[in-house]
Image (tube, rainbow, N blue to C red):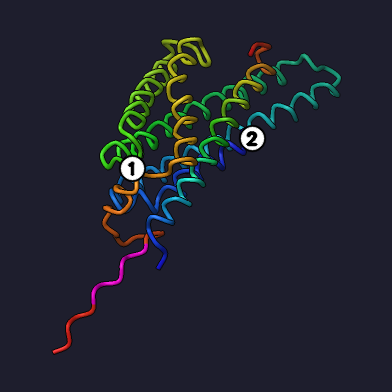
Amino acid sequence: MRDPAESGKVIAKVAGVLFITATAASLLSTSLLNHVLNGSG
Amino acid sequence: MELLAAFSSAAIAISLYPVLARHRPGLALGSVGFRLIEGMLYAVSAIGALLLVTLSQQAASAKAPLSPYFSATGALLRALRDQATLAGVLAFYTGALMYYWIFFQTGLVPRWLSGWGLAGVVLGFTAAILVLFRVTGYMSTLQVLFNVPIAVNEMVLAVWLIVRGFSSAATDSGLPVSGPGVTRAAPAPAPMP
């Protein structure tokens, strides 16, 4: 059975990368689409 | 880009589930559910934007590009995109409230960070409700300002998780529970008579 502390570290790293990806993608897509559709950023 | 946001949003809660479920299985499952709904709605929003591109291409090649058909369909697709995004944002705040609450209760991340997240969620949810009831506009200055705290918090939380991880004391104290994605600790063998 995998050590909970070790698996917790891996999960934290994966979640951290996903948080950055989701937040950056969400902000960029909202900003870019708003710019294209409304002509403002 | 929006599809990437959709998939990674859902993946966040799924990846956190094994850790969160050791502490609050119900809330952990709830956060997965709401962030899956968020991802689905962001995908709908992205499809709306792609359909707008198709519509504009058809309008460009049409004999009467300024016909009411194109403007009405375009307005409908934009409304679909905005409403799907707004509903997705509401699902995000509900899911995020659940895991930030678990973080706050268990101390998996420092309380200043989870408390900041909870405050950001309340502010962002308030802004989304104001947009829903048309008190303020979609992507208005008020909505953007109310969303800054949670956006910055998510970035700080991400760096914290990558560099420091979860608090080892909180990770070890979580009682193993049954459920999908959670491994139950093997029970101690009964003493032989």
Residue annotated with mark 2: B47
Q: Is residue B116 left or right of residue B2?
A: left
Q: Amino acid at mark 1?
A: Leu
Q: Amino acid at mark 2?
A: Ile
Query: Quick one: which residue is furthest to the bottom in this view?
Result: B193
Q: Give the class, few, some or many, for how many residues have Cα within 10 Å of label 1's Cα (few <14, many ≥20).
A: many
Q: Chain of mark 2?
A: B
| Image quadrant assignment for residue B188 | bottom left
Magenta segment range? B183-188
Q: Position of residue A36 (x, y in %)?
A: 69, 18
Label 1 – label 2 distance at C-alpha: 37 Å
Label 2 sits on a secondary structure element that is helix
Q: Main secondary structure of the magenta part?
A: loop
Q: Position of residue A13 (x, y in %)?
A: 50, 46
Q: Give the numbered dot on residue B24.
A: none
Label 1 sits on a secondary structure element that is loop
Q: Is residue B21 above or below residue B138?
A: below
In the depicted view, which residue is nearer to us: B65 or B146? B146
State the quadrant of the N terminus of chain B: top right
Q: Residue visible at 35% across and 34% down?
A: B97
Query: Quick one: which residue is furthest to the left in this view?
Result: B193
